[in-house]
Every structure is written in C-alpha cells, then in structure tokens.
Amino acid sequence: MDEFRYHLSNNFERAVFLKGDVVYPREATRYQWASKNLLGNDIFELGCSTGYGRQFFDDDIVYTGLDYDQTIIQVATKQNWAEYCTFMHGDINQVQLWNYDTIVAFEVIEHLSNGLQIVEMLKLHCKRLLITVPHEEPVGFWGEHHKLHRLNESHFDGFKWQYINEAGHIFDSPQEITKDNRCNLMIGVWNRG
C-alpha cells in the first residue's frame, strides 16, 4: 500500500488521500477555507488528485475534478466521494472548460510553466477563483516539479490574500520562516467584477 501511495503521490509532490484517510492539517485547512468561500454550487477543481477535497464541500455541490494523471483519476472515481461528482483526465492546456461558479486550483499553478497564463484563463470560466501557491519559494525548495518560483502577490491581479503556514494555520500576513515553519502558502480569492 505504501508503494501504491508513493507512486500516486508523484514522489510526494501530490497530496494523496483515499476515502477514510485522515487529511493532513495544511491540506484540510485549505479545503475548509474553500468550503467557506465557495460561490454557487457548480465547482471545478484543477489538479484534483484523488478528489479528497470534495469531502469538505456540502452534499449539494456539483463537482468536476481534472488531473493530468490518468491513474489518479481512476482512483478518484473509485472513491465515490459524493453523488454529484465527476472526474476527468486531461491537460488544462487542451481541455475545453465550461463556465463554473467557483474554480479551485490548490498548489497546481507552480507546476505549470504557463501557470500565470492559466490563472488568467481560469478567470474567464468562473465567477470566483480560489488558489494556493507557495509564497516566495526558492528554486529547488520543493523539487524539480515546480516550474514557477518566487511567486508573490504581485504576480496575481485582483486577488485578496491570506497565508497558510506549514502547520496549517491561516494568517493575514506571511509568517516568519523558521525551522518549525519552513514555508508559507498564499491562499487567495478572486471575484469577477
């Protein structure tokens, strides 16, 4: 089972939780925050992994998750997270998106060489966009899978920001980097006019 999870986690680059697993505090915090910040009932998640974030949303949410990894989508589908829940395999650069009430993209933008352009494209397909990205992450801090580094508030027009520390607590400003807090995530909300 550990080898299975290691494979799905893409060398621990993707958070992988199955139905019934305890979700780690930082991951749980961002989905609890998202649940409070959803607009409407039609939700799309980019980089959905196993779809574990769906369990934090109300039952009446119509949820569509997209991930580029076909195996993770097969696992997500088998979890039966909720009645109104669909998963798709695909590349965000090639998928035709519909219009959604809210789009969620947690810790995925930094993985895409055109991630900042993807954010602007996502804005065209939703009323509200919720994202997290590492704050001021140095090159190599979280490995080779991150294509964009040193992201900060100036890279994202129109977002209102808060910050999650390594322990999973939300603050209004980034926390000091220490041996107990090696990183901060920016957690932001954008609303269409």
Image (cartoon, rainbow, N blue to C red):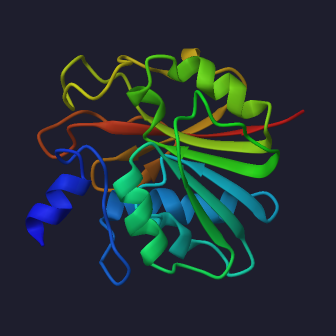
- Does 88 sit above or below residue 172? below
Q: Position of residue 138 (x, y in %)?
A: 25, 19
Q: Is residue 18 left or right of residue 154?
A: left
Towards the viewer: 181 or 97: 97
Q: Is residue 150 left or right of residue 157?
A: left
Q: Quadrant of residue 177?
A: top left
- Location of the N terminus by quadrant is bottom left
- Does 64 sit above or below residue 62? above
- Which residue does the image show at 44% across and 67% down from the upper left? 76
Q: Position of residue 183 (x, y in %)?
A: 27, 37
- Location of the C terminus by quadrant is top right
- Which residue does the image show at 41% across and 64% down from the upper left? 74
Total residue callouts: 0
- Which residue does the image show at 79% across and 50% down from the upper left? 100
Q: Is residue 173 left or right of residue 100?
A: left
Q: Position of residue 38 (x, y in %)?
A: 71, 59
Q: Is residue 125 left or right of residue 85?
A: right
- Does 20 sit above or below residue 29? below
